[in-house]
């Protein structure tokens, strides 16, 4: 092929347009084939990654790897990223469930403490009422004792005044 081109150029004859067109066509076909072979796996990864991000974002899904080139390395790295994200998300979910359970326990304990405090408040109010009533009764008893003391003192004074009269008789008139 190249020999013919050289020969034709040396002879000064016409330019071999047919051979140039065939070479150009083959170059285009080879370039398209290489582009297809390179971009097809990348387009597949893009499509698969979009599916991974749709909906509930299932982090257990992985990109399928069918080749052993740079795109396969890229897919493996993306799969490792998703694997780590899945591990992190699982850890966060577990921690959230534990926090929820702890919150429920704390809430139940708080309700129980509130119930106990209400019961104690009722008992304290009842005791306060009883102490107030007892104090009023004690004050009434003290008032009655004061009156009894006054009556006793008056009686004592009257008896002390009457004893000499009884012992010596009636007063003379």
Image: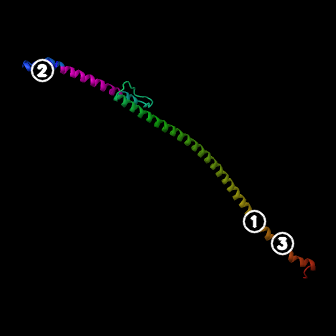
Identify whether 146 is placed above or below 107: below
Q: Secondary structure at mark 2?
A: helix
Across and down, in percent, residue 148 comes to 80, 68
> How many angstroms separate mark 3 from mark 1 (CA)?
19 Å
Identify whether 15 is placed above or below 46: above
Q: Nearer the viewer, residue 3 or 78?
A: 3
Foreground tag (2 vs 3) = 2
Q: Nearer the viewer, residue 15 or 164?
A: 15
In terms of sequence position, does the residue under pointer 2 or pointer 3 come before the other? 2
Circle 3 sits on which residue? 155
Q: Is residue 157 left or right of residue 112?
A: right
Circle 1 sits on which residue? 142
Residue depicted at 70% across the width and 58% down the height: 131
Q: Is residue 24 left or right of residue 46?
A: left
Across and down, in percent, residue 9 comes to 9, 20
Q: Can residue 95 be found in the magenta stretch?
A: no
In terms of sequence position, does the residue under pointer 1 or pointer 2 come before the other? 2
Across and down, in percent, residue 141 comes to 76, 63
**Crowdedness of circle 1 by 10 Å Cα count: few (<14), some, many (20+)?**
few
Circle 2 sits on which residue? 6
Residue depicted at 81% across the width and 73% down the height: 154
Badge number at residue 172: none
Question: Looking at the figure, which quarter contains the C terminus?
Answer: bottom right
In terms of sequence position, does the residue under pointer 3 or pointer 1 come before the other? 1
Magenta range is 23-45
- Location of residue 19 (image quadrant): top left
**Crowdedness of circle 2 by 10 Å Cα count: few (<14), some, many (20+)?**
few
Residue depicted at 79% across the width and 70% down the height: 149
């Amino acid at each position: 092929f190249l020999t013919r081109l050289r020969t034709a150029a040396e002879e000064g004859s016409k330019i071999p347009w047919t051979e140039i067109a065939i070479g150009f066509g083959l170059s285009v076909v080879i370039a398209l084939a290489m582009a297809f072979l390179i971009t097809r796996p990348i387009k597949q990864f893009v499509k698969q990654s979009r599916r991974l991000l749709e909906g509930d974002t299932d982090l257990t899904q992985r990109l399928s790897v069918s080749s052993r080139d740079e795109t396969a390395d890229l897919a493996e790295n993306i799969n490792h990223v998703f694997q780590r994200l899945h591990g992190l998300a699982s850890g966060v979910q577990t921690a959230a469930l534990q926090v929820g359970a702890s919150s429920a326990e704390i809430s139940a304990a708080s309700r129980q403490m509130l119930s106990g405090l209400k019961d104690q408040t009722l008992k304290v109010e009842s005791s306060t009422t009883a102490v107030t009533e007892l104090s009023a009764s004690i004050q009434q008893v003290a008032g009655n004792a004061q009156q009894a003391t006054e009556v006793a003192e008056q009686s004592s004074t009257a008896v002390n005044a009457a004893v000499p009269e009884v012992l010596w008789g009636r007063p003379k008139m």
